[in-house]
């Protein structure tokens, strides 16, 4: 793809890293000379040290043949102006970071794809790290359901049981599913069957229609997570 | 919990929001007077406008009874100093944001829990939004496996088929699992059985041992994702 | 009317002056504290010293009952964000200053009324003051036609002639019209008839289908205007 | 003409644009290096990055052969000093922007032509755009008279009538004159006669000795303009 | 007198000191808050912390009843604007510091009294202190004549001689006059007669039609002044 | 002479001008790069853009062969340090500007020649210009005596009188002396005798043992100077 | 004592700490408001937030009754001005920090006691910490002699020997003296006699006329110190 | 040794001076370009103008072969991060300046050698210079004992006595030892015997188990030191 990235700040930099490593043709527009220099020194891409809200800059960036434009500056008004100009040039794929959640609507209204609450995403991860340390990673499904990764501790209720035994002991309610088991020496993860036996230190991917409730995480041996 | 949050910047602010909303007792330490004022005006928590690397400040923050400290400033050296001081006061749960990936090791060495590459996380999401627009959300499982959310388009190969029919047609390989189905009017998501029929506009949660490969996303009707 | 004015800078200030003097209910949003203070001290209006791109500020400004919003900040991205938010609140009448002419299109595209090239307007007036000093004021009609004010000098070809005499002498082509005559001691301006006599020092309002051409301004006694 | 323009700010830039496009020999004096560079890159003129209140600078600018000098800086004291120095060098045509209306007198006193209230001009236009949206453009004649452009709406009282009929119906008072009619496909504008018929969508140039009063604009079908 | 002093900088401060000590009613206008505060704390006068080029400020300063206005800011354009406004208010006595010697003419042209080259005055004194250290103080009379103060050294040619003897010995040419003699214990200075005897350590006030030439200063015992 | 001038500010610049024009070998030390450049571009002298309180700088300036050093920076501490270092290098002639009158003593104590109160000197001149406008120039002799220049107005008591007549009429007290008369067309000034007649418009150099008292200035026709 | 400390920076702060703790009456003069506030909040002393080179400030500080003044600002010119003013007020004891070693002479010349090279002192300690880590503390005596503290390591040549035995074994040359022995549980340090036995872990105070040479430090078991 | 010095500020500069003069291979890391330039111009060492907390910088500095790293920046968090990174690279000898005494513990905890209170060291010296001016230099031994240098004044009690006589007269208590005598013309210092005679102006190195008490300094003729 031919990708234009606007802004080479805290978010723009790793984005440039990913986009160039993935073999795309990348153009970066960054107004600040120091940041622009830093990009030029590190990545193999065209870097324009200019104002992205100026037509000339977008022209120079090759906006006519751009497949995707990602606006990552830390000012929402700048991001929206850039997106509108990109729309004018009929860029097929436009994404923007949005800093003030109350501006989400405006971006949607003009039809721009947005990254929902980047800082909140990080904040949520940090919070979980102290509030639910047993949960290694997770993903929300709708309002309450969750897929999450959790390690089985020694002597946890489920330790040493097959899935069928676990279900028989009422350890796993109906709307909970063990999706995958990461286990030392096994790659890819094990896709569990009824007779697959759960062991201590297994890293489970679990789906729960009601989320990672304490009653559920207890099953995997993390009573401390109830402390919240 | 009694939580001390150091830094009320881009990451600290939503963290304070989550932590206070979750009913914790929260103390915020922020050196910048403007930011400190902003917190004071918005959240119900103790806010100290002071240098978190000074013992007196930590004392005032009630460091002795703190359950968890989260350091979110944008300077790694400050974060590490804060974490070391927190260790000196035997705070049981210490987490820090780390900005330079090469500093990860140092934090680990002194035994501090870290948030891995916050900006990279956002950058990855943004990149996916343009590179694989069909994937609504996703979570990596180990090296290659993934859980992801994807919408079924009208006339997609799987549209109108039951899971059994889909398997019969070799649409879903063995190590792929439809974990849940979000459908207009259904809450919680449907836990699919063999005879559950997939419909256009269903938002599927899918587990794939080999990730969201184009051959797989094609099944749900997103050939454009092959363009990467 | 209930008018919200965003920005109290070089353009915003006289606008506030006009809008309050005309008996409207005016709310001013200005981010800079000094400017906000200056307004508060001078005009009878509500002044909000806040960021106009924040929903709370617009709420406080009474956006729901606003008849018209005029955005006058010197940053186009800020103006466009403000206009989009005003649209979200269904403000019936939205106008914005636009600084970069190349941004005109974007404002039009989202349906916002704009002030065309404010600086260019002034620049044009200044230029005319040196290039055509005889023209006191003027207004363009379509591409080439103009209405303009011009003083009659002593001994100008038209000095002392009635309109009929002037026409007879071929001084006034067919598509030129003397619209009004401002003369010392006459108020309102004289609406000229065929037998109205033009005198030196009359300030004429003239319509010309081909503009204020030198051949025409000569008639009123301003040969120097040919020097351009 | 040989024109010296002092200041390349918001007003100076479009002035340079007009003056160079009109084929004059233009010299620009701008103290700020960045602005000076911007001009140098965009226009074909001599640009001096220097203090215009220094004799040397004016000498370099060719003040001895200058036909007109226009001072556009945003500081009135600088403008007046520049104008006085230009008078010393007997520049025949000197114009200045004046920012503080109370300084007008001082400029007049030393015999310098001024641009009356540039910001107020813009402000007035903006205000009209919300207060009298039907008026497309206008020009004040003396205290109360006005020439203005207005569109005829479908079913307006005057729609479909000749000027004579309109007069008969008392739609147009005596001191109101339809000066010109811009109509799709007609160029130049039509100079109306008594039997010229007004149609919807005509853009009329109207002279009114008592201004664009609501009773008058009603005739052209804009009752909403009464809302002021 | 009722005196308005504009500017409380390096020159303004001692001026305020002199003017208040001499029993005048003094008003000071100074834009810089720190400087304004310093004046307020030290002198018994009205101090306005405001822009002297604004009519309101001058009004507040009582410009209508002002006997004299002295403008001492370090910007010539500001000084000239202040002087022009003072002229508008018919202040009878207006003086200004001028920094750029090439602006002298402009001040003269508008009829403002100026302080000629303040820095040059100091520079000249400093230079004399190293170039002609024997000259304690001096005043130029026309092009070449000078009145100067000089000390008589022990064994100088004139030491111990009466004025008549000095003239007889051709020590004092015809167009040189000993105006006064300051001598320890004598107050006021001695007005010399023909038989007054000059002594070592006398501080003489000398008038010379050809200035303080080395041949003349030698007479008072300062051969080193020839070194220039 | 070989002169080192420290500081190229408001006082240093004209000093450099005088010193170079008088044919001396001049070295300038100025810390500020902009000021140093300005000197380099204007005067024929060695300019060191460096800190004058560093031994190396003084060495580079040729301190060992310096005849005179003049310190003109606007910081007394810097001036005193420079003077002390110059003493260490046995510069024979050292002069310094002193800004705070209370520092005079300290400079004297270490044996440095000083310029007494530069700003006060200017302030005094300015004050005189408004308080005693008749006095064109003047020089203090001891506590009260003065030499001053004053113009004779038409019809002044002394107008048309010889010195003897003036003395007879008691116009000139005993301790007042007309030292010289500058008169249109006479060069050098006239050295007056008893029968020299004073005329209107003569510019007199007058010595008065009791200063330029109103009773005395009245004689030359300046009653307005009594207004003080 | 009544002590005036000028400057509350990096050196001034701990000095204020020592001086107040030792029961002196302390006055601090610090120009920077923030620093002044910090002192006011921490120490029991009079703090003047003012310029120490102003007579008024010194007066307020009670300079007339001051026993000692210590100038610690980081600008040598300021320090020297303060010291000269203190001399003028006959402060009996004046000490100053000197930053540029080449200014030492000037301070000595005016008779001010100085702290020799404070930063160099620290630098030397730091350097020793890496170059001769065995030396705990040390003091230079004249050019080469040193008193130093060193720990005896297990199995060092001197470990377990009496001083007489050590001398007999030629371990301690004649001009080396064990001055004191700090040993766990002994307070004050042991004053050694001929039969005092040296033990491992003793912290010895050693005098050596030829310094802490490697041949000598070897005796106490630190061969690694030879590595320099 | 191969030494890396981080920071070229007030402490870093003289350290670089010592380290390079002592023949080590020195690498300096300094973030500030001006400081880096200053080092480059003065010392023969590798200078990296970069952030020392970045792995690349340490790599460039040759961290793998470094014998000792000394961190001298004025920010403790930066110092600690640098030290942790140096530990990661197994630098054998790591020393840091610590600014906040309360951070000492943290440095110790991670096993880094520190310079104890550099500013306090200087402050103590300064204080002694005014509080005990007789003490030329000194070194603390444990809690109370001291080695100090003191000059013998004329007619001091010990002046002219041998050590035995002094002991007989009870001038020197048992736990006081004259360690060395610096005397004009003697080099190295004299190692005193019982019959060595003390003379006025001798600079004695004295060990006292109870410190430099006034009763002891009296013996050497400094009663004024009691004044504290």
Image (spheres, coloured by chain):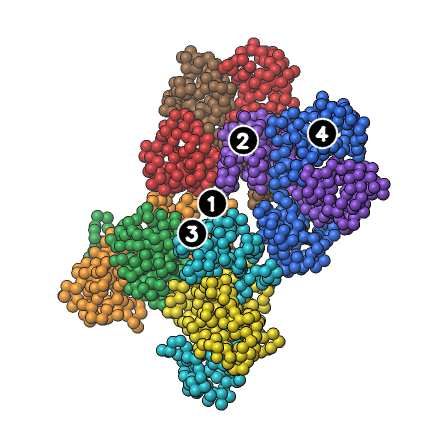
Chain colours: A orange, B green, C red, D brown, E purple, F blue, G cyan, H yellow
**D128 above or below H17?**
above
Read off the residue under disc 1.
A53
Label 4 secondary element: loop
Which residue sits at x=61%, y=21%? C216
Q: Position of residue B51 (x, y in %)?
A: 38, 56
Q: Answer yes or no: are tags 2 and 4 on the same subunit.
A: no
Q: Position of residue C137 (x, y in %)?
A: 54, 24
Which residue sits at x=59%, y=64%? H42
Mark 1, residues whose alpha carbon is within 10 Å: few (<14), some, or many (≥20)? many
Read off the residue under disc 4.
F173
Please tell me which residue lies in front, H162 or B123.
H162
Distance between the alpha carbons at the discs numbered 3 and 4:
64 Å
Q: Position of residue F43 (x, y in %)?
A: 70, 48
Which mark's residue is nearer the viewer, 2 or 4? 4
Image quarter of residue C44: top left
Q: Is residue H144 left or right of residue B1?
A: right
Read off the residue under disc 2.
E25
Distance between the alpha carbons at the discs numbered 2 and 1:
57 Å
Label 3 secondary element: helix
Please tell me which residue lies in front, H162 or B227.
H162
Q: Is residue G96 left or right of residue A171?
A: right
Please tell me which residue lies in front, A21 or D31.
D31
Read off the residue under disc 3.
G37
Q: Answer yes or no: are tags 3 and 4 on the same subunit.
A: no
Disc 2 to disc 1: CB gap under 8 Å: no
Disc 3 to disc 4: CB gap under 8 Å: no
Which residue sits at x=66%, y=48%? F39
């Amino acid at each position: 793809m031919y990708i234009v990235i606007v802004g080479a700040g805290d978010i723009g930099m790793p984005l440039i890293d990913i986009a160039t490593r993935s073999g795309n043709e990348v153009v970066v527009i960054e107004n600040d000379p120091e940041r622009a220099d830093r990009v030029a020194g590190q990545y193999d891409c065209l870097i324009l040290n200019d104002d992205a809200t100026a037509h000339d800059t977008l022209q120079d960036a090759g906006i006519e043949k751009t497949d995707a434009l990602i606006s990552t500056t830390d000012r929402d008004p700048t991001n929206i102006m850039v997106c509108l100009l990109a729309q004018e040039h009929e860029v097929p794929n436009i994404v923007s970071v949005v800093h003030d959640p109350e501006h989400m609507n405006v971006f949607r209204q003009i039809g721009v794809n947005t990254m929902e609450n980047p800082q909140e995403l990080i904040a949520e991860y940090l919070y979980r790290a102290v509030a639910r340390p047993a949960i290694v990673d997770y993903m929300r499904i709708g309002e309450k359901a969750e897929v999450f990764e959790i390690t089985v501790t020694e002597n946890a209720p489920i330790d040493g049981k097959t899935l069928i035994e676990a279900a028989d002991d009422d350890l796993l309610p109906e709307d909970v599913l063990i999706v995958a088991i990461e286990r030392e020496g096994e790659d890819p993860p094990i896709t569990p069957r009824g007779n697959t036996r759960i062991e201590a230190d297994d890293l489970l991917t679990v789906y729960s229609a009601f989320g990672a409730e304490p009653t559920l995480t207890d099953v995997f041996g993390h009573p401390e997570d109830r402390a919240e």
